Amino acid sequence: MTDVELTRGHGLRHLLIIFGIAALVFATVGALNSKLNPYVYDQQAIDLAAQGLVEGKNLANYDPNIDLRALRASQIEHMTATPDVVLFGGSRWQEARSEIIPGGHKVYNAFVSNDQVEDMLAITYLLDKAGRLPKTMVFSLRFVSLQPVADRTTYDWKQWGTEYAAMAERLGITPTSYFSRAPIQQWSGTFNMAGLFSRVQQIDAAKDSPKLTTEAQTDHLDIIAADGSLHWSKASEKKFTKKFVDKFVDNEILRAGPTRPAIDRDLVGVAGKLIDWLRDKGVRVVVAQTPYHPDYWTRIQNYPFGETLHGLEAVATELAAKHGAIAENHFDPAGFPHCAPEQFVDHIHARPPCLEDMFKRMPDLVSGARS
């Protein structure tokens, strides 16, 4: 064997050793992330939690940063009864508890984080597949719900890429390409070393452990309730001081104010086709917005971002006129007695008293009757 061949052999072995070590590190990080973040990476743990929710228990966790889409999908699959009303949108709806909604209806709050129009198709597909289409679906439009895919900076919707594509085909719509909807970011997150380190620190500092419980609130664990809504822990609620919220409002004005997210007209058409399909199935469709923090709403009118928000209100009105949805636009908190600054945890997330005001002004979600 020549010196060149020996050198190449040693180089190849070194390369294989490096690859082997890297693979071992990635596998270890992935296994630890799965163990320490079961409600993000462990489908079996998510299924057990979903079964507990169906049985009327609440899921208490360190925080609400779990794979809500996987949890919603599993809970829908395990349901033994069909909800009267399904609320679907982003975290703006997170504190919409069933007891604050008039009518005594069985309500399932299926909110997720960073919702897009593709999520609306996916949740509809999941409900229909399980035979759980409700009497009424309530959708809402986030500031980037209808943003072109190429412009997006959040990728959570891709978790439901398969369900979105299946529903798109039912609607006669060509879904985005597999590459553009593949949840690559979520797959890679399993092997995130920084995320693992943060999780270890969080667990080390935690004063309680995740569990299924009948409690509606705990001292240190946030809760995803059986009806899907979020209940903050006592410790979390203490963080939402006036100083905290005012700073959040100021920062969001500076961050988002100069931007103007686009509204893709093709995606407006997708929403319209989904509404038509649901109405053909006998489902009432409401397109509702939740109120913004009063100071934020007043100030954002002077920025390009405010134009996008008004554009979304116009889309809701259009969907009502052309597709028979019911439009309830409530970005503006004026007229809601409890939508005062102290009833927000930041610029956009309203507390239950504010959301209750909103629902009281709406027609009955099932009958359509005005109170």
Image (spheres, rainbow, N blue to C red):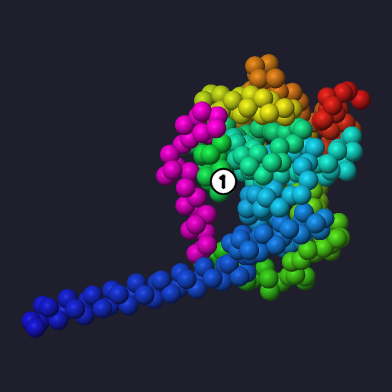
Q: Position of residue 13 (x, y in %)?
A: 26, 78
> Residue 173 lies in magenta, yes or no?
yes
Q: Position of residue 354 (x, y in %)?
A: 84, 38
For the residue pair 192 and 31, the one nearer the viewer reads as 31
- In this view of the protein, can residue 293 be seen by the observer? no
At numbered mark 1, what does the secondary structure look like: helix, strand or loop? helix
Q: Is residue 14 above or below residue 269?
A: below
- In this view of the protein, can residue 71 be seen by the observer? yes
- Side (left or right) of 187 relative to 19: right
Name the residue tied to disc 1: 160
Q: How many marks?
A: 1
What amino acid is found at the position of numbered circle 1 in the picture?
Trp
**Residue at the extreme top of the image, as rendered:** 321
Q: Is residue 128 above or below residue 200?
A: above
Q: Is residue 322 above or below residue 177?
A: above
Mark 1 neighbour density, 10 Å: few (under 14) some (14–19) many (20 or more): many
Residue at position x 44%, y 43% in the image: 178
Q: Position of residue 173 (x, y in %)?
A: 50, 29
Q: Is residue 162 above or below residue 239?
A: above
Q: Position of residue 370 (x, y in %)?
A: 88, 23
- Side (left or right) of 92 relative to 183: right
Residue at position x 87%, y 23% in the image: 369
- Side (left or right) of 236 relative to 163: right
**Quadrant (top left, top right, bottom left, bottom right) of the N terminus:** bottom left
Question: Which image quadrant for residue 217?
Answer: bottom right
Residue at position x 80%, y 57% in the image: 55
Magenta stretch bounds: 168-192
